[in-house]
């Protein structure tokens, strides 16, 4: 959905109605099979190659359910999806979008390196003219604008929150620059279960993740223009999301 339409809908509708509308348009696009080779949708269409029926998956930064819904369908009634979303108004719409999906458990919290209250921020309105639902981040004093929209949330440690889960086959993580913190804290679970991991990241955070998971026996892949996975070429990296697949332990 283009930015102009986002801006129009954001100006015309109350926030909750705006969130419901943009999410329904997204799901309609997927149902019609549109945008298969666009950056916004290519990984959603690729999910059947990352998950299987019966899998257990964690969606960190579930947003409005853009990945959670297809993940729920793929893993089926014998599988389980944990959808982690800290922003209350987004989580409210997420629950509506996932209504009737008994294999999904929604967790209204942020993940991080501690168990404490935190403040989330979203400064996309001033920059883009509409509320970007995937632009929420933990405001730890980094760079939130003074006019940013703010939300209260509870942070939890993923390593303790999912400690009793008997299998973890897949993790999707898109949390606006906090990926290294969250996945680093969850590394004991990663070492135990060796899930496939899909991460959105950029800049120094991206390089750190590649190094971190490389040392744990993971190989990085990205989708090419042909829709297939290709080994990540850091010299020609175009910033697409990274798929980390476990290969074998690295000998020390």
Image (spheres, helix red, strand yellow):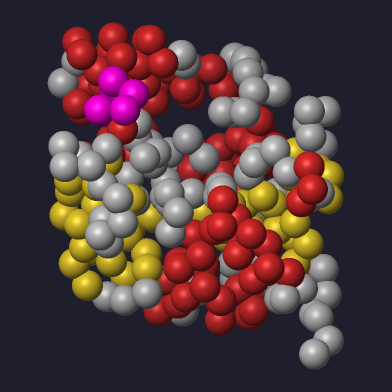
Total numbered badges shown on the rendered structure: 0
**Residue 194 x, y percent position in the rendering:** 68, 71
Identify the residue shown where x is 34% and y is 31%. Answer: 132
**Residue 162 x, y percent position in the rendering:** 45, 72
The residue stretch that appears in magenta? 125-130
**Residue 151 x, y percent position in the rendering:** 17, 48
Q: Is residue 199 above or below residue 56?
A: above
Question: Would residue 162 be seen by someone viewing this image from the given angle?
Answer: no
Residue toward you, 52 or 247: 247
Identify the residue shown where x is 77% and y is 73%. Answer: 217
Q: Main secondary structure of the magenta part?
A: helix
Q: Is residue 101 above or below residue 17?
A: below
Residue 83 belongs to the span the image colors magenta = no
Residue 128 belongs to the span the image colors magenta = yes
Question: Would residue 228 be seen by someone viewing this image from the given angle?
Answer: yes
**Residue 130 x, y percent position in the rendering:** 29, 23
Identify the residue shown where x is 36% and y is 40%. Answer: 135
Identify the residue shown where x is 64% and y is 41%. Answer: 239
Q: Is residue 107 left or right of residue 165?
A: left
Residue toward you, 49 or 212: 212
Using the rendered view, name the quadrant where residue 92 is placed. top left
Q: Is residue 206 left or right of residue 163?
A: right
Q: Quadrant of the C terminus?
A: bottom right
Residue toward you, 67 or 76: 67
Give the residue at the far bottom of this rendering: 252
Q: Is residue 86 left or right of residue 235?
A: left
Q: Is residue 121 above or below residue 8?
A: below
């Amino acid at each position: 959905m283009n930015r102009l339409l986002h801006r129009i809908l954001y100006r015309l509708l109350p926030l909750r109605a705006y969130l419901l509308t943009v999410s329904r348009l997204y799901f309609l696009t997927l149902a019609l099979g549109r945008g298969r080779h666009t950056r916004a949708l290519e990984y959603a269409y690729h999910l059947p190659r990352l998950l299987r029926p019966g899998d257990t998956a964690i969606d960190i930064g579930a947003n409005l359910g853009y990945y959670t819904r297809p993940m729920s369908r793929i893993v089926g009634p014998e599988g389980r999806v944990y959808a982690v979303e800290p922003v209350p108004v987004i989580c409210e719409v997420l629950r509506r979008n996932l209504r009737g999906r008994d294999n999904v458990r929604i967790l209204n919290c942020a993940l991080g390196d501690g168990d404490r209250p935190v403040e989330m921020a979203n400064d996309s309105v001033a920059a883009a003219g509409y509320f970007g639902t995937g632009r929420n981040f933990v405001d730890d004093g980094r760079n939130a604008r003074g006019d940013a929209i703010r939300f209260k949330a509870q942070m939890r440690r993923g390593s303790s929150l999912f400690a009793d889960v008997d299998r973890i086959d897949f993790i999707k993580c898109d949390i606006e620059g906090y990926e290294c913190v969250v996945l680093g804290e969850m590394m004991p679970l990663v070492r135990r279960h060796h899930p496939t991991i899909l991460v959105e990241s950029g800049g120094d955070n991206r390089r750190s993740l590649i190094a971190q998971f490389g040392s744990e026996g993971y190989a990085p892949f990205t989708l090419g223009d042909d829709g297939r996975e290709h080994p990540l070429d850091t010299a020609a990296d175009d910033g697409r999301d990274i798929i980390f697949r476990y290969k074998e332990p690295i000998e020390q």
